[in-house]
Amino acid sequence: MAELRREPILQRWVVITGNRWEVLAEVLRQRREGGGRACPFCPGNEGETPSEVFALRDPTSSANREGWSVRVVPNKFPALRVEGDIERTGEGVFDQASAIGAHEIVIETPSHYADWGTMAVEEVAGVLRAYRERSLDLRRDDRFRQILIARNYGPGIALLRHPHSHILALPVIPKRIEDEVRGLLDYHGRKERCGYCDILRQEKRAGERVIRETGTFIALAAFAARYPFETWILPKAHAHDFGTIEDDQLLELAGLLRSLTGALQSLSPGLPYSLVLHTSPLLRFTEPRYHWHLEIRVRIEVGGGFEWGTGFFVNPLAPEEAARLLRGEVGDTRRANSTE
Amino acid sequence: MAELRREPILQRWVVITGNRWEVLAEVLRQRREGGGRACPFCPGNEGETPSEVFALRDPTSSANREGWSVRVVPNKFPALRVEGDIERTGEGVFDQASAIGAHEIVIETPSHYADWGTMAVEEVAGVLRAYRERSLDLRRDDRFRQILIARNYGPGIALLRHPHSHILALPVIPKRIEDEVRGLLDYHGRKERCGYCDILRQEKRAGERVIRETGTFIALAAFAARYPFETWILPKAHAHDFGTIEDDQLLELAGLLRSLTGALQSLSPGLPYSLVLHTSPLLRFTEPRYHWHLEIRVRIEVGGGFEWGTGFFVNPLAPEEAARLLRGEVGDTRRANSTE
């Protein structure tokens, strides 16, 4: 039985899904040797997944059949389960809770080998629309405290090649979001301003870490980037809740994400990356001092490998260089430097 | 120029070593295509590394020549540099500091293909002795706030196959250690007891997550393990400072680490793992409410891949099952379950 457990000193929640070692060893073996099975996310294989909870599809087509452009289904192997009440129990220093929650998969396109960099802007916007619609539906369940959206691309990072994202609805607030909320409330307490609003104002003035700007959004190479090409995308006007994003903004954000992921792939084809969406926790109401945003991380390990367990990160690529590369100014940079 | 930067909201320090993309792309290319160069850590190649700062060697041998069993050298490509003062500068919301610090490599054995599981206990104890001696020497420099020791083993995790560890002396306290100190002080404030002492007392009573116990140390499968086989090793009597460990305790700890890493390798040969040593920060004095310990993580990715950027961990292996496996009780478990 899956279980949520809280680490007593760091107060971090972890889901223990509780598989046996044989199950895990078999997963590792299959991954080493490759699948050979048909992709469950490809058109025609709709029966391989649980029934869809949302889809963008041809109005003449039927649910769980071909004719869709985006499809959201419950995960066949969920980390959390929707049924039941949240029981919280304690045992001395340890706290645990039943692993209640939702775990859905967004199948982003019928095309097995696509990625955002090569999809049409409208297709990427459809994926973002699925994020919004499922977020709004899932939060009607008042057991949930956080909607988490994450996307992995590339060999060794994503288990299945077919482009997909995860949507999780959690009964607890993950440590990283809680740390961010605490940092923002602390900043707000001192300055009565939003910390992210201050960052983006300063970055717009400085310019060197700005990758791209649209009417509504800004993409930045993070000042203290933990990883090469760590990129943040924020709405320029303060907004704490991704659920309130409008249709034209979805399209604008899709264009930005498409060009960013495209830029990464042209630097190094097949470069794996991960993307997460951070939005306000749900505590009956949302937290208006939050500022929702996206974070992108390229998955190349070139540090010393002591990030794990220490929280000490070594990033070999300067964010200013990353911003130049993602702006497409490589040639200019080289020329500028050859005259030094 | 390398630089320390602090993330304004999460207050996390990151080292930006500032390599250009070409340098990084070349590193990635070399790693893909394999080295072909001779191992700089093997006996006979002592000239390939900077001069040793510590060694356990045959008394008739000379420094930087063959005849050693453990050798500590400054890293040829350090994340931090020893020379200079720490200059802290600010720029609006951003804080930065010069990346001053030490970065040393412990070459653990002359044998290229060894690992702790196959080395003699005395050899592993020699590595731990190098950890202690270098820790004590580096902390005499009052610019440093934290000694960090980390070790990676296995393909894709460690850049060089030859067994080695990293020792870092940092002018800032890494976020993870700071979070732990804060959690421990908070716990101490409420209960006037050490949180880790309470955990290990409770775990000894429960027994199911205890992997092994010696006179001085206990090895536990962490209650809220983030990763399969996440293991903690703690001194059973409260001790905040690894630097005070005694010679006979080094030998005892070496025996424990040797049997643990051996158990991991017999479950799945070549299984990559990481190990970090957490000890009290250095703030002119050390923090007596800290409790030093080791953490081990097996590097298999079988979660959903949303740990990054969310702090939300999914661990598919129950810690109780991990403890049984590492205690070598696999057969018993299977029998117990076949009668259910």
Image (cartoon, coloured by chain):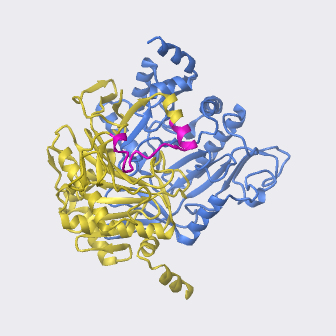
Chain colours: A blue, B yellow
Q: Residue furthest bottom?
A: B339
* Quadrant of the rendered image containing residue B13: top left
Q: Residue at x 54, y 51 (%)?
A: B305
| Residue A296 can be seen, yes or no | no
Say left or right for B174 vs A19. Answer: left
Residue A160, image x and y in percent?
A: 66, 52
Please provide percent x and percent y for residue B58. Answer: 24, 56
Instruction: Tell me if B88 is positioned left or right of B42 in this view.
Output: left
Residue B51 image-quadrant placement: top left
Membership of A168 in magenta stretch: no
Question: Percent from the top left, x then y, of residue A153?
Answer: 61, 44
Q: Is residue B28 magenta?
A: yes
- Viewport quadrant of the N terminus of chain B: top left
- Write down the region rendered in magenta: B27-49
Q: Quadrant of the C terminus of chain B?
A: bottom right
Seen as rendered, the residue at the extreme right is: A60
Image point (29%, 34%), residue name: B81
